[in-house]
Amino acid sequence: MKTRKAILGITIAAVFAMASMACSQVLSPEEGSVTVQLPGGSGGRAYTEAERNGFTYRVTLTGPGGRTVNAEGSAGNAVTIGGLAAGLWTVEVRALNGDKTPMAYGSDTVSVTAGNNRAVVKMGDIIYSLSQLNSTLGAAKNGDTLYIGSDIEITGPVEILKDITISSIGNHTLRRSGTYINDLFQIGGGPVTFTAEGNNSLILDGKSINANAPLITVTNGTLVLDTGVVLQNNDNTGILNTGGAVYCKDGKVVVSGGIIRDNRAMTTVGNGGGFFLANSDFTMTGGAVYGNKATTDGGGIFIENILISASTDAKIVAISGGSIYGNESLSNGGGIYCEGSSAIPSLNTVIFSGGSIYGNSASILGGGILVWHSNVIISGGAVYGNEAALQGGGVYLLNGDTFTMTGGHICRNTAPGGVSPGGGLYIDTFINVITTGAKNAEIKQNIPTNVDASSVGGDFSGIAIGGVNGESDVCSMHY
C-alpha cells in the first residue's frame, strides 16, 4: 500500500450557478448547479507533480428527498454538477490517495436557490492511528477539524492545547487499551469539541477497566460535547477523586449533544459518576447523561465550586435542555450535586430553565438535585420520578442565598424514609425563597407531602398558586 499523505487546511469553493455556467443541460428556474474548484495545494503549499497525479477527489452531494449525486476530479481542476433541485444540499469532499483511501474530508450545507450560491468546504485530515492523531494535532492550527476514520486503541494520553474539533466520519470508537489506566485526553485551552458528522458516532470507551482516571481531563480549558459523541464504560477507581467520564478544573464544560452513559466514580470518596467539575462553569443545552454511578455524591454530575471568592469570576451552572436520568448516588444528589462557596453563596448560581431530570436515586438526600451554598433559579424543565432515601426526593436545597421558582415542574418524586415532608422539594436554611408569580410552576404528586421548608425567609406567596391545569393547591408548606 502506498504511504498515506496528510492533507491540512484545504479550502474548496463550491459555486452554484445558473445555466450560463459550464453546465451540460438547461436548468429550470427551480434548479441550480454546483461547481467545485479542486485545490492544487494544501496549507499554502503547492502539490508536487506526483501528488497532483496521485490524488483523486470524490464529491458527493445529498439533497431533498435523500437524492445523492457523485462526481470525481483531480487536483487543480473543477467539477460541475447540474440539475440540482432547489433546497438544502450537503456537499462532501473526500481526497483519495492512489489506493483510494480517503486522506482528507470536508463538508458544508448550502441552500440551493435559482441564483448563484457559494459554499466553502474546509478540509481536514482523516485519522487512522494514534501516532497519526498525535502528530497531526502537533501540526494543527486553531480552528482545525480532525476526522476519525477508523477505530483507534488509546495507549497513552492525547494532549490538546488548541482550539480543535475532533469529529467522526463513520461509527468509530476510541477505546482504552487493556493495559492503559490513565485519561484518554488531556485538554487545556480550547475549546476542544468532540462530535460526529451526520448520523455517525464518535465513542470514547473506557472498556469498564479499573482505571485511575476519567476519559477526559480538562485543566484551564473548555470542553464541548456535541451531537454524535458518546462517553461510556469508564470505571475510575484511582485514589484521586476525579469523576467517571470527565474531570474539569478551573474551566468550562458545554454539553450541547451526545451521550454520557455507564460511567462510575468508584474511589472511597467517589464523586461525579459522569462529570466532576471543580471551580468551573457547566452548560447543558442537549444530550443525555444516564446510567452513571458515584460511591458518594453526584451520580450524574458533581460540581464543587467552593474555592471561588469575590476576587474571582462567579460561576454559572445552566441547564436548558437535554436529559439527566437513571443515575445513582450512594450518598447525595442522584442526578446533580452542586456546592458553592460557604463564605459567599451568591457567587455560584444554578439555573434550571429546561430539560428533564428523572429516574435518579440518592441513598440519603436529593434524589434528582442537591444544591447548597448557591443561588437557585427554576424557570422551566421537569424534575420527576426521582427518589431519595430521606429528604428531597426531587430537589434538596441547603444553606443557600436565594431560591426563585417561576416555572417548571417537580412531580411524582419520593422520599420514602424521610421523617418530615419534602418528597418533591426540601428547603433547609435559605435566606430568601421567592416564588411570586409562579403560576406556571407545579409541585405536586410527590410522596411524602410535596414541600418542606425550614429556617427560611423571603416570600412564599406564589408557590401555592394553581398549576397549569388549574389545580388550586399544587403543594403544601410545612414549617
Image: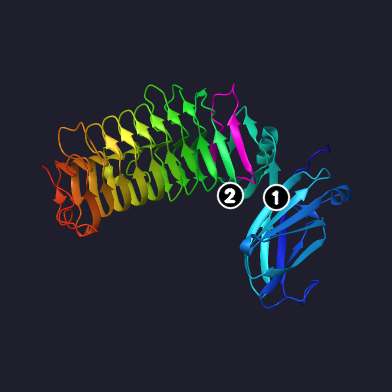
Q: Position of residue 95 (x, y in %)?
A: 76, 50
Q: Residue 23: x and y, percent?
A: 79, 71
Along the line of sight, the residue nearer the viewer: 269 or 98: 98
Image marks 1 and 2: residues in contact by CB distance under 8 Å: no
Residue assigned mark 2: 199
Can residue 190 be seen in the rendering of this structure?
Answer: no
- Give the residue at mark 1: 105
Q: Which image quarter is the N terminus in?
A: top right
The amino acid at mark 2 is Asn
- The magenta stretch is 167-188
Identify the residue at image location x=65%, y=35%. 151
Binning the other alpha carbons within 10 Å of mark 1 as few (below 14), some (14 to 19) or many (20 upward) gives many
- Looking at the rendered structure, the secondary structure element under dot 2 is loop
Query: Is 416 left or right of 314, judged from the image as shown?
Result: left
Q: Amino acid at mark 1?
A: Tyr
- In the drawing, does residue 81 fall left or right of residue 279? right
Classify residue 244 by image quadrant. Answer: top left
Q: In this rendering, does residue 257 appear at all?
A: yes
